[in-house]
Image (cartoon, rainbow, N blue to C red):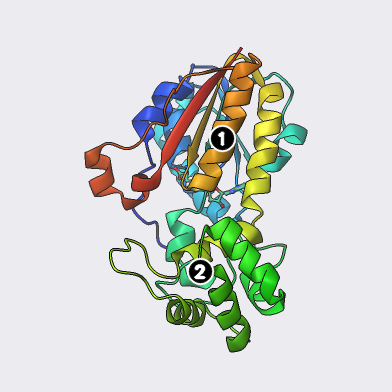
Amino acid sequence: MTKPQHVPVLLEEVLEYLHVRPGGVYVDATLGLAGHSSEIARRLGPKGILIAFDRDPEAMELAKARLEDLRAELGPEMPEIRLVPKSFSEAASEIEPASLDGLLADFGVSSLQLDEAHRGFSFRSDGPLDMRMDTRTGETAEQVVNQEDENELADLIYEFGEERRSRRIARAIVRARPITTTAELARVVSAAAPAMKGDKIHAATRTFQALRIRVNDELGEIRTLLESAPSLLKPGGRLVLISFHSLEDRQVKDAFREAGRTKVYEVLTKKPVVAGEEEERKNPRSRSAKLRAASKV
Ligand SMILES: C[S@@+](CC[C@H](N)C(=O)[O-])C[C@H]1O[C@@H](n2cnc3c(N)ncnc32)[C@H](O)[C@@H]1O
């Protein structure tokens, strides 16, 4: 596997809000390509601990190799790294209560997952309709697309894709079944609900997002993490979360508002922090990134 060029999103802002303390204990809930983790590790020093989750075995292997390179570079300055090849919704059973100085999550899919056609996340390259982050378990997008009834499909495309033309798309999918590849699905969706004048996104973007969210239970995962985070952080510990679409950001915003009201957190970002122009130019993924941060009271 090649090592794609990778610049972690909102890196400076993540480091500012996470406020990495040498010798501290931090969690990266979404290790991915180890971009953020590497920079956290550089600041932790030999007494620090970084616990990193990823449920994607391919990402974990790649990240492991990158962290080995970092170990060779940092030598005795390398902190202890604990890799946890699991979902971050399991954090509460993997981490001591009130033990963390900070927790970071950079939600969504990595460029590795999007770029590798065989993972089935992208309509830009043809691959099997898989979309599972954790390839060891769970139902694939192909199963959802070919087995759900039309109403269920329409509801999920509406709810998780925020796609107003969901009924029409669901009807076209059911007529075209079986659908087994990303290109086939993209074709069916684009024909049923073509991009409209002025649309900035591909006609199939919302449907693919909906399937990905469903296959990986992405919103359920975030909900569980938001519920367990307060008990895992030390007083003063930082929570830094990066969302990529409105459904994710709404969950974070609502949880922060409630936790701010009940004095569980002090919310550090009145408005979400977004990328600057230069980052947006260099890294298209950063254009939809929204960072929110809080400190445990
Ligand atoms: C956007 S990437 C993270 C990129 C990373 N911050 C970096 O700098 O390289 C998201 C990663 O989180 C993982 N992921 C997403 N949801 C997860 C979950 N619920 N549990 C564990 N890992 C998850 C994905 O497999 C993916 O590798």
3D distance between C-alphas at marks 2 and 1: 27 Å
Q: Report the residue marked by disc 1.
A: 252
Label 1 sits on a secondary structure element that is helix
Q: Is mark 1 within 8 Å of ligand 1?
A: no
Front one among 43 and 157: 157
Q: In the picture shown, does residue 67 fall above or below 214?
A: above
Where in the figure is residue 214, as x and y percent of width and height?
Answer: 64, 59
Q: Quadrant of residue 255?
A: top right
**Closer to the eye: label 2 or 1:** 2
Tag 2: amino acid? Arg
Which label sits on residue 165?
Answer: 2
Q: Residues within 10 Å of mark 2 (few under 14, many from 20)?
A: some
Residue at the image position 53 percent from the left and 70 percent from the top: 120
Amino acid at circle 1: Val
* Whole-percent x, y for residue 133 in the image: 60, 58
Q: Which is more N-terminal, label 1 or label 2? A: 2
Secondary structure beneath dot 2 equals loop
